[in-house]
Amino acid sequence: MIDLGGQNHQPAESGTGTSDRPMAGWKMTLRLVAVLVVGVVLGGFGVSELRDSRDLRERNAVVALVALPQSANYGGSAAQGSVQLSGQLLLINAGPAPITVRGVQAEGPGVAVRSTGQPRLLPPGGTGQLLVELRFECAVAFQPEPLSLRFSVETDDRQVREATHPVALVGSAWERDAQRMCELHTARAGLVS
């Protein structure tokens, strides 16, 4: 028998589960969206930090060094057609990070250069001088091609790298001082004979 006049209008139990499912679905969707947003934010932050770290490593690895010969008249000696002088090399750090120039050497026709001074720390845009020992063969003319100096450089990331920089010897203070010493040596040798 069916009672149509009753006041009890509660939905059947199967109906109750149906009305809660859309609400549970929305909650689940909101949770997934929240997790996705948090993941994107954290991922973006991580990628940004990784990119910044990589950019910093690349910046610290850059070596842009300029070198110019300065005076070479800090004492010297002459023997068997060659002169040996002590001189200075002006260094300019044109790179974006500090570097330490640990040493320099070069060899060319009739000329050899090697550092004798202490390493020089150069801030970005900074300058310094490196003491060098120069050997010139008096019978060999200075070459018009630049002499390629090879530097041992420690970058800000504690890596030691090699850098090269050409320097023109013709017209430089090194050429002038070497020629003066060669002329003195030749004059003395002529007096002794």
Image (cartoon, rainbow, N blue to C red):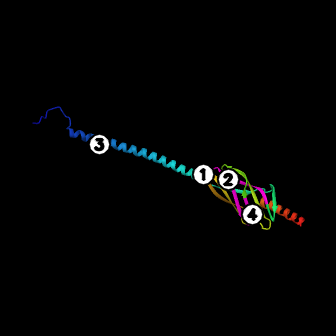
Element marked by disc 3: helix
| Distance between mark 3 and mark 4 Cα atoms | 88 Å
Q: Which residues are magenta?
A: 84-113
| Quarter of the figure that contains the N terminus | top left
Q: Mark 3 or mark 2: name the one nearer the start of the chain.
A: 3
Q: Amino acid at mark 1?
A: Asn
The answer to if 93 sits in the magenta stretch is yes
- Mark 2 sits on what residue? 101
Q: Residue at x 75, y 63 (%)?
A: 111
Q: Residue type at mark 4?
A: Val
Asked which secondary structure carries label 4, the reply is strand
Mark 2 is surrounded, within 10 Å at the Cα level, by few (under 14), some (14 to 19) or many (20 or more) other residues, namely many
Q: Is residue 58 magenta?
A: no
Dots 1, 4 in contact, CB < 8 A: no
**First in residue order: circle 1 vs circle 3:** 3
For marks 1 and 3, give the one nearer the viewer. Answer: 1
Q: What residue does disc 3 label?
A: 22
Q: Residue at x 81, y 59 (%)?
A: 77
Vertical position of residue 99 compared to residue 186: above or below: above
- In the rendered image, which residue does mark 1 sit on? 60
